[in-house]
Amino acid sequence: MPRYWLMKSEPFKYGWSDLVAEGEGTWDGVRNHQAKNNLAAMEVGDQAFFYHSREGLEIVGICEISVAGITDPTDPEGKWAAVKVKPKTELPHPVTLKQIKAEPKLADCELVRYSRLSVAEIQPDEWSVILSMAGI
């Protein structure tokens, strides 16, 4: 069964439009152990929300894991995980962090509980709620 994720990126470094322009991007540079474990748990076909951090603070799109289980190419020691992702769809209505925090059904969401986590798992029921909030 596919799993769902949320991946944060600062839009001025690598935003949704960058992923769309590339067609496929490598999600690398993660240096947090829990986020690394989440990246390592991903499988091809899993879906992830693309979240703009620092600027916007909102989920703007959905991407799909296209290559899983790779070593981060930016890590010379080979200890950190990475995946490749392809853009799937831009959200009709971005979902802000403020909206997510205001939704009681998302109170236990890793995005809310572990705000500094750059790669978080999203439960299927949370995924559905966020899709609804986005107009999907």
Image (tube, grey):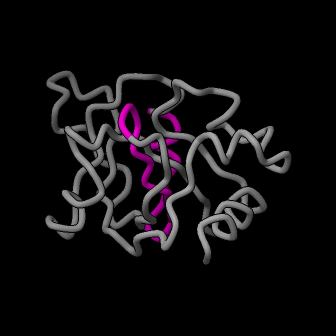
Does residue 6 appear left or right of residue 101 in this picture?
A: left
Task: Pinpoint residue 7: horizontal percent, then vertical percent.
Answer: 45, 46
Residue 86 in which image quadrant: bottom left
Q: Residue at x 24, y 51 (%)?
A: 26
Nearest the viewer among 88 and 102 is 102
Question: In the image, is 122 to the left or to the right of 35?
Answer: right
Q: Please report the residue visible at 46 percent of the width from the left and 34 percent of the height from the top.
A: 118
Q: Quadrant of residue 68?
A: bottom left
Is residue 90 found left or right of 129 in the rendered image?
left
Front position in the image: 50 or 57: 57
Q: Quadrant of residue 76?
A: top left
Task: Name the spot of residue 4 as percent of width and height, x first.
Answer: 59, 58
The residue depicted at 56 percent of the width and 41 percent of the height is 120
Q: Position of residue 2 (x, y in %)?
A: 61, 67
Image position of 64 with respect to 98: above or below? below
At horizontal 23% and vertical 60% (from top left) the residue drawn is: 17
Residue bounds of the magenta highlight: 36-55
- Dividing the image into 4 quarters, which one contains the C terminus? bottom right
Rendered position, 62 above or below 52: below
Seen as rendered, the residue at the extreme right is 104
Q: Residue 87: percent from the left, percent from the top?
A: 33, 69
Count of numbered marks: 0
Q: Which quadrant of the rendered structure holds the N terminus? A: bottom right
Pick whichever, 6 or 81, lies toward us: 6
Magenta segment includes 90: no
